[in-house]
Image (cartoon, rainbow, N blue to C red):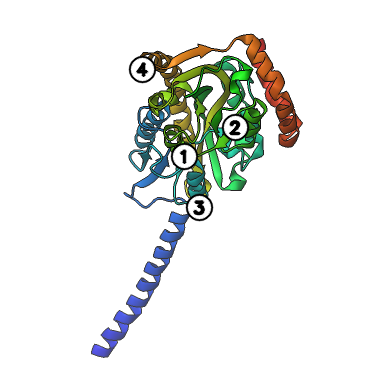
Amino acid sequence: MKQWIKRSMIALTIPSLLLATACGASGQDGQAAGKQPEGKVRILKSGIGFNEDHSQAQGLIKFAEIVEKNSGGRIKVQNYFSSQLGDDMKMMEALKAGTQELTMPSTSPISNMVKEFGIFDFPFVFNNEQEAYAVLDSPFGQKLLDKLPQHGLIGLGYWENGYRNLTNSKRPVATVEDFKGLKIRTLQNKVHLEVFGALGANPVPMPFSEVFTGLESRTVDGQENPIAAIESSKFYEVQKYLSLTNHVYTPFVFLMSKKIWDQLTPEDQKMLKDAAAEAGKYQRALNIEQNKKSLESLKAKGMQVNDISPAEKEKIQQIVKPVVDKFAKEFGEDVVKEMYDGVQKARNK
């Protein structure tokens, strides 16, 4: 009798174990396919170079709030500011490896991987932010984002970096001749290097996280960035002159790791894209306001500010035209034409 009971228990236990094993494997497979275990919170690490005062950081805080609310707390974003997770190139590599979920570089470093993004480094493309938005938020802008997945990245949309302006510790830059001999930190980008070289400056590529130290030690004389970035990074402490060149409008690209993206359900993917768009509108408006306030603040902090006349800007355009023409061929003249057609369409509205 005892042997019969023992055999019966074994017979009942084996199917139960097999069922449990099958369920366990199914659970693992489900998690890999993006089916989040019940009650488990997914954490998305987001890293940027700017500190918490900058509009990009404030926009990411807003993004985190939207994501947590719209996911019912299932997904949370942890933001790391001031290059805590590394510079733009390091963070993009982390996204590709799947060890970091989110970052937001400008288009300039991305162009080292997807060359077509380099068109946003062409000088004097957009007359105002609205023209830029019209191009970025169009099918043309999406077409560029669609080139990212093959590099292990997903583009959630475009936020605003803004118009870049020149600072230095030597002199006001009001004419083309004033560029000559200045050691200018540039982005790690071929277009920037050649544009400033054509103007007679000595361009020095450098990660953003190293710029303040480079300016302080006089490794470089100056740098170029949007006004809000100049203030939030405290460049006024080591730079005397601010020249309102407005030479390039560069957007941020909100990037996500494709490895992580592919683990999400279509519903959560859409939720993240929608949250990026909603927070992006907030960030764009905030950035414009920040730039206005930062300009007045920089003047109050002792920076000498000067404009550049339209005539001098025209001279700059003529000098750098061969550089633009060269890279237009490299990036694809059809792509460049489509961008400029989009700008013209926005102007004709």
Secondary structure of the residue carrying tag 4 is: loop
The answer to whether marks 1 and 2 mark residues whose Cβ atoms lie closer than 8 Å is no
Name the residue nearer the viewer: 285 or 232.
232
Q: Which mark is residue 202?
A: 2
Q: Earlier in the sequence, mark 3 or mark 1?
A: 3
Q: Position of residue 271 (x, y in %)?
A: 45, 36
Q: At 65% from the left edge and 28% from the top edge, which residue is drawn?
A: 195
Asked if disc 3 and disc 4 are in contact, CB closer than 8 Å, the reply is no
Measured in 3D between alpha carbons, the distance from the residue under mark 1 to the one under mark 4, in whole angstroms, is 31 Å
Residue tagged by mark 1?
103
Amino acid type assigned to the residue bearing label 4 in the image: Lys
> What's the CA distance linking mark 3 and mark 4?
43 Å
N-term-proximal mark, 2 vs 4: 2
* Residue type, numbered disc 3: Ala
Q: Which residue is mark 4?
A: 301
The image shows residue 159 at horizontal and vertical percentages of 50, 28
* Residue 98 sits above or below residue 236 on the image: below
Which secondary structure lies at badge 3?
Answer: helix
Q: Which residue is mark 3?
A: 97
| Other-residue count near label 3 (Cα within 10 Å), few / some / many at <14 / 14–19 / ≥20 | some
- In the foreground, 20 or 257: 257
The answer for how far apart the CA atoms under marks 3 and 1 are is 13 Å
Circle nearer the viewer, 1 or 2: 2
Closer to the eye: label 2 or 3: 2
Pointers 3 and 1 in contact (CB under 8 A)? no
Residue 109, compared with residue 301, is above or below; it is below
Residue 28, compared with residue 317, is above or below; it is below
Q: Amino acid at mark 2?
A: Asn
Q: Which circle's residue, 3 or 4, is located before the other in the chain?
A: 3
